Image (cartoon, rainbow, N blue to C red):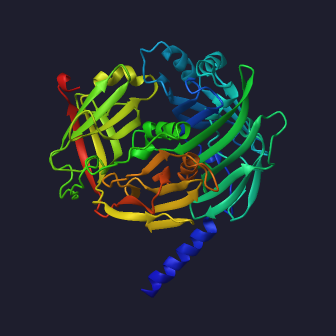
Amino acid sequence: MLILIALWALFAAHGAVAAPAEVVFDPAQSTPHTYRVAMRTQTEGARQASSGRWLTLQGVTRYRVSAGADEPMLTMHAEPRFLQADNQDGVVFSSARHSAPEHALLARTMDSGFELDITRETGATTLQAGDDRAFQAIAAKIDLPVEQLGQLIPAPAVARAIPAETGAQVTIDRLHGLPALRLTVEQVDRDSVTAAIDQAQAGHTANIPVTDVTGRLRIDRHSGWITAMTLISDRQVGRAGRTLRLHSAVTLRAVDDPATGGMYDSLRQFKTNAMLAALAGADMYLPESAADAPERRVIEPPQSPLADAEPVFHTDDEHGALVLDIRHHDGENIGIDQITVDTLTPRDAEGQPLDLGFVLESIGQNRDEDNTSRIRLLALGPQADRLDEIADVQAGVTYQPVSAPTYVSLPLRDATTELDHGPAHARAVPVDDGWLITLIGSYSTYYTYDHTTVFKGRSAITSDRADGGAAPTDQVLLDSVDDPDVWVQQYELAGDIDSFALALYTAEAKASTHDLTFTRAPRGDD
């Protein structure tokens, strides 16, 4: 036993020495890396009905080092494999829609790719589209400055060395046209270094109409590839003789397979984040009488999740989508329970895997069919016209039951009050003539308002109000660098009241894993 302990200590000491003292991007580890990228913009000062009021762009991009591995200038080739734009009117364009009029334009942009030059000494980046005309046309279609659209292809590495030491600072110049940024190391562990990002010099920078930048990133300590990053910026743009404020958030997350993940990984959830940022102030429904409030129902975690479920699929050729339905028969609580896709393999009629890639669009309860969960995926690259080749789909999923809620009250006072339960946190801050209610948790352990309680004499609106820091919709993107499962809700509450009724949901029941085979549904079931 003593020998084993000594060997373990020697191994641990060797590991501590082996961990590099600074993070340096290593092109030798330059096998292609795939990332999910997303950007949302909100134009403040535009009319309510303007189509440019808010916009999301989401994509899947594969990067590889193409030149300059040992030179002062490093060049990466970026190959977009999926691009989609949404605004409040719906989908503006999507590369999965192979029959849409704009598909040829998207195909030209994606096929030609981008060259991303990174200067090692300063960290400055320069982006060049392979088909600049097509890229300019896409920017014009969504009424976005082309240099702003270029942030959808962020650098997946920091060329400058970053000390693996808490408190260390490094300055990066001209990252995608942004002013000089300061990285401050906040966390260091064996595998990663996490840093906060802010402007090296506060205020407006000459020739760069950016007034504020904040962010966070996590870097693989051994290779220098970025694991996750969020950059939030404000800039001034001219529109129709007026100067407007353009608020943007860009996220980058390394993925092995963009088809996998949970609700927080979906295209829909990032779009919801943009909607909450742009449409804060909407009235919330609060029951005002016992007749309006639903009864509290008994919720028991299923004993054998998915044991009798019927997995079927169909394809949506118009939108380039693969749709997986799980029809439940064992009383799962699909409105609150969480499903995560761990693996996905479409197969042909001979049972062989198909070389088809997808990105997760949405996952959760299918409100169009009772007792059904739906997983919707969009095709990558030029593969949307091959969906009919799919004979069945094999998927590994994790099912996490959520326990029956505990009903609690958050006191409302003249000073801040709080409740805590593990990752779930509730806070009430007095503001104006009411309270700012902020609920922070995960998708399986969280507080939410108790919709079974009568709220007579009270009113509430959705909120995205900064409370001593970033706005909640920005903060959740910053926090997701460390924890992609984070979920934030915020309301502004008014009324002659001394408490706010909450329901606490927890993931106390053990999660289970399942291998499902989805067979093609009869055409009438699509």
Relative to 393, residue 338 above or below? below
Question: Residue 326: x and y, percent?
Answer: 23, 40
- Along the viewing direction, whichever of 12 and 201 lies nearer the viewer: 201
Considering every residue shown, the one lying at the far top of the view is 101
Point out residue 94 in the picture as x, y percentages from the top left corner.
47, 24
- Which residue is nearer to you in this view: 310 or 247? 247
Q: Residue at x 45, y 67 (%)?
A: 420
Camera sees residue 56: yes
To which quarter of the image does residue 65 belong?
A: top right
Quarter of the picture holding the N terminus: bottom left
Going 31% across and 60% down the picture, which residue do you hit? 405
Q: What residue appears at the point 44 percent right and 64 percent down from the top-left corner?
A: 410
Image coords of residue 140 (percent x, y)? 63, 18
Q: Position of 21 compared to 474: left or right? A: right
Q: Position of residue 95 (x, y in %)?
A: 47, 23
Report the front residue among 495 and 34: 495
Q: Left of 394 or right of it: where is 440?
A: right
